[in-house]
Amino acid sequence: MKFATRAIHAGYERDATTHAVMPPIYQTSIFSYDHLGDEQPFCYSRSGNPTRAALEANVAALEGMKYGLAFGSGMAAIDSVLRAMLKPGDEIIAVADCYGGAYRLLTRLYQPSGVIVTFADLASDPGQLNALISERTRLVWLESPTNPLLNIVDLERVASICRARGVPTAIDNTFASPYLQSPRDFGIDIIVHSATKYLGGHSDVLLGVACVDDDALFQQMKLVQNSAGAVAGPQDSFLVLRGIKTLHLRMQRHEENAGRIAEWLQGQPAVEKVIYPGLASHPQHALARRQMRGFGGIVTIYLRDNSRAAAARVADRLQLFALGESLGGVESIVNHSATMSHGSMPAEVKAACGIREGMLRLSIGIEDADDLIDDLTRALAD
Ligand SMILES: *Cc1c(COP(=O)(O)O)cnc(C)c1O
């Protein structure tokens, strides 16, 4: 089945008794047994819940993976993958400009507990993995496009280096969404989403999903999910399932609007640089074209005046763009990454990544692009 059909149908067989078209919200903690010792698919909602199971199967189908596991947030999904893969003394090699929350989790929780955390610029130089991987390396953590600088990592190259060395790879596929990028096709082993963003798509729910193909890896992830218990609730699972039904339509419009706005921003005197993988000026434009089915809905800009005051002035003057942390909703959002999404990164790390004070990350919504351009015109005026 093609993507749009999978988005709408995968993971849910119409309920046998009621024929409900939408998966019911099974708002229950327990499922009783008829007889002591019965085998049944659900017994307690931490171990499994039918609404959550529908979502897990749906996202797995979108990623072309066998198994999905849903968690209470994107960070809970990331943490569960790290827990399943790493113990003290093990090493993780992570893409240098990863999501601020992932950076904080790795440096503030995992590093102090004895996990060796190595950051590397895997977008500009994936080949360095050959030298970096040691017998301690247990996981390579990727993001592509990265947040907020939209660097593209060559997934096929990284996966082939890691496979040759027996090191599993994981990717945070939040920015592309499964509609625009299928990491499994390139040999990536674990795919994680903050479903809070494009999968949910309406800024009304927090949820995370991890997908895997390998049976043993799934058992390990399932053990973490059931033992640590950071599961997604049935209401939230329902909201994400509902969001996913329009994922393909929304992504098409996000992409169309973002492409047009990125082009337009390039001609604005207040803007020094526009970063968008769909622009020919993006250093990895050709790779993005090969590896993705589109360039996504996020556009990052460097203002000519590289000061926090200049960024604040633009952000404050925007009216349609909400100033906020998140992205991927139907509405447009502007984020000052240096103080907001990546506020937990040390200044020197931000500088090395290229996260500047005069930088704004725009999550382009699905409003009318003319109105968004009018809003940006007013905000960028002298
Ligand atoms: C938001 C985000 C996360 C964290 O997800 P939450 O649902 O907020 O916990 C992880 N990775 C990326 C790329 C994100 O944008």
Image (tube, grey):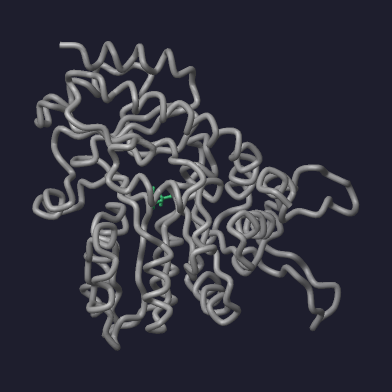
Res 30 → quadrant: bottom right
**Image position, residue 317 (x, y; %):** 25, 16
At x 82% / y 79%, what residue is drawn? 38
At x 54% / y 42%, what residue is drawn? 200
**In the image, 378: left or right of 71?**
left
**In the image, 203: left or right of 284?**
right
Locate the C terminus by quadrant: top left
- Looking at the image, is 41 positioned above or below residue 5? below
Res 31 → quadrant: bottom right
**Image position, residue 192 (x, y; %):** 47, 59
**Image position, residue 32 (x, y; %):** 77, 68
Numbered disc total? 0
Res 79 → quadrant: bottom left
Residue that protrudes farthest toward the bottom in the picture:
135
Of the pair 91 and 253, the residue shown nearer to us: 253
At x 58% / y 71%, what residue is drawn? 213
At x 47% / y 45%, what residue is drawn? 196
- Looking at the image, is 118 positioned above or below residue 356? below
**Image position, residue 76 (x, y; %):** 43, 60
Of the pair 336 and 96, the residue shown nearer to us: 96
